[in-house]
Image: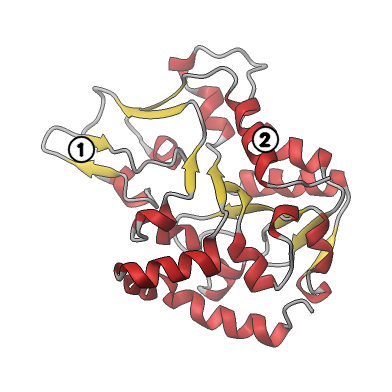
Amino acid sequence: MSRSMFGVSIIKKFVPRNFAKSRALENPAVTRFVDKKLFDGDDLICLPKDNVIKVRKQLDAPDNMVLPSQVVDHFIEKSSFRWIMNFCICRDALSCKDYPTTLGCMFLGEAARGINPALGRPVSKDEALAHVRRCRDAGLVHFVGRSKLDTVWLKIGPGERLFTICSCCPCCCITRGIAIAPPLIGDKVHKMPGVTVSINENCKACGTCQAYCFANAIQMTKTGAVITDACRGCTRCVSICSNEAIEVKIENEGYVNETIRRLSQAVDVT
């Protein structure tokens, strides 16, 4: 039986506390237990923004460059079933003021057929593609792949038949918890293969980028910002830097196909 609306209302009450509660994960035994129950088998990849990849002069990219969003489009095209949530449970629970609460997650694959009909609706391929475009236009960042947490809170499965397309904001979404999650859990959210983000000599050490980093991957020094290995490549920092001091580079021309191959091994959407 899928998650009831009453159950969803209870879950929403705990969303504002999830980041503080994660401090309990400092206990290794608790971490292992939570990982097994909520994150076992996860493989989520953060996709950079298309507009950042396309417009950066440093890339010298042609107009027909393969873009990160084509990963999402591929799985939508292949999927046997597509479901859009009526709301984002994170933004709705926290009454987000800066990003739409009505642009919810999308779920692909046969397991999504079990979602409570009161939570959303099945959609066509074209409707699904239009939805992710609206999410990107609103400034949201896609986290895609396999997420056991979604099978738990929705009470559906199996996990290998559910593909998550989460469109996250930097202020309210559960991805904020990555910054304080232990590696056993946090390391299951990955940067897209072949994508690197770096600081150039234009940096004025203003600190604006640091405030937008959900992974706490940017450190400030006297001479400027430094991007650490914790970076998941969301590229929000590139979008908001007024000095054009942050660059995105693609070091693997097959980065989109590599991402598709990897996620296809984790989830079957057909």
Residue in view at x 71 percent, y 53 percent: 160
**Where is residue 207 drawn, in percent x and y?**
25, 44
> Quick one: 78 or 248, which is closer to the camera?
78
Q: Is residue 56 visible?
A: yes
Query: Is disc 1 placed on a helix, strand or loop?
Result: loop
Disc 2 marks a residue whose amino acid type is Val
Disc 1 marks a residue whose amino acid type is Ala
- Quadrant of the image containing the N terminus: bottom right
Whole-Å distance between the Cαs marked 1 and 2?
34 Å
Q: How is the image coloured?
A: secondary structure
Residue in view at x 46 percent, y 70 percent: 34
Residue in view at x 63 percent, y 84 percent: 9
Residue extending farthest left: 222
Q: Is residue 245 visible?
A: no
Is residue 73 placed above or below 175 in the rendered structure?
above
Is residue 236 placed above or below 42 in the rendered structure?
above
**Where is residue 155 drawn, in percent x and y?**
70, 73
Name the residue that disc number 1 marks: 205
